[in-house]
Amino acid sequence: MKRFARWRWCALVALLTLVVALSFYIVDTICHANFHAIVNGEAYRSGQMNAEQLTHVIQEYGIKSILNLHGENPATDWHQAEIATAMKLNVTHYDRSLGSGEQMTLEEMDDLVTILRQSPKPILIHCYGGADRSGLVSALYRFAIEGQKPDVADSELSIWYGHVPLIRPKVTAMDDSFWRYVSNRTAHAELNPQSKLIFP
């Protein structure tokens, strides 16, 4: 009986934690477009912003480049506004199309890491909600650019940013992609001691 009570208490705590985290994410997304620093002064992440929000963030944080993970959508108002804002404020803009439920190839992640390394800093990384695709690329930034330990970099794929595989199982594709990248690149570095762990 005591064991059941303890299990019920643990389940309640887990449920409350999930509710609090999701509530925080919803409020943060609505009010601040889920905007957070990955590395202060170097890289930031967010959900999709309107022109006013984007202008404020660019000016406030000195953003020099934007990596849009929601894909190139020239016929949509939001994409036109984002491109126009970037051009107006002299910000470099990159478009890449990621699916939050689709695993990425190593080549695709290498391409993203190349952008992260070569882009003017600070860079703003965004997708639609700022939770899953942005989480993956933020984790890649911390691992491949900053050289942080994988389990530290993986914290970018967190419930606190709205990444909740428990509710949306398909987004585990982002976690799987990150760990496959880590496994492959670490193995490559071990086989080639003269090469750098930081890729490409």
Image: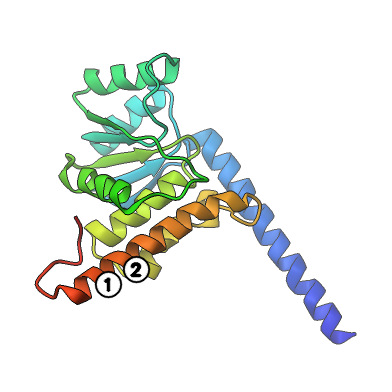
Q: Which residue is mark 2?
A: 183
- Image: 75 above or below 158: above
Q: Is residue 169 left or right of residue 137?
A: right
Labelled disc at residue 169: none
93 or 9, nearer to the observer? 93
The answer to whether mark 2 and mark 1 are in CB contact below 8 A is: yes
Residue at 24% over, 65% down = 147
Spot occupied by residue 146 in the image (x, y as percentages of width and height): 23, 60
Q: Which residue is mark 1?
A: 187
Rate crowding at label 2 as few (under 14), some (14 to 19) or many (20 or more) other CA atoms within 10 Å: few
SS for callout 2: helix
Picture colour scheme: rainbow
148 or 62, nearer to the observer? 148
Classify residue 145 by image quadrant. bottom left
The three-letter code of the residue at mark 1 reads: Ala
- Image: 148 above or below 90: below
The three-letter code of the residue at mark 2 reads: Ser
Q: Is residue 23 left or right of residue 87?
A: right
Classify residue 2 by image quadrant. bottom right
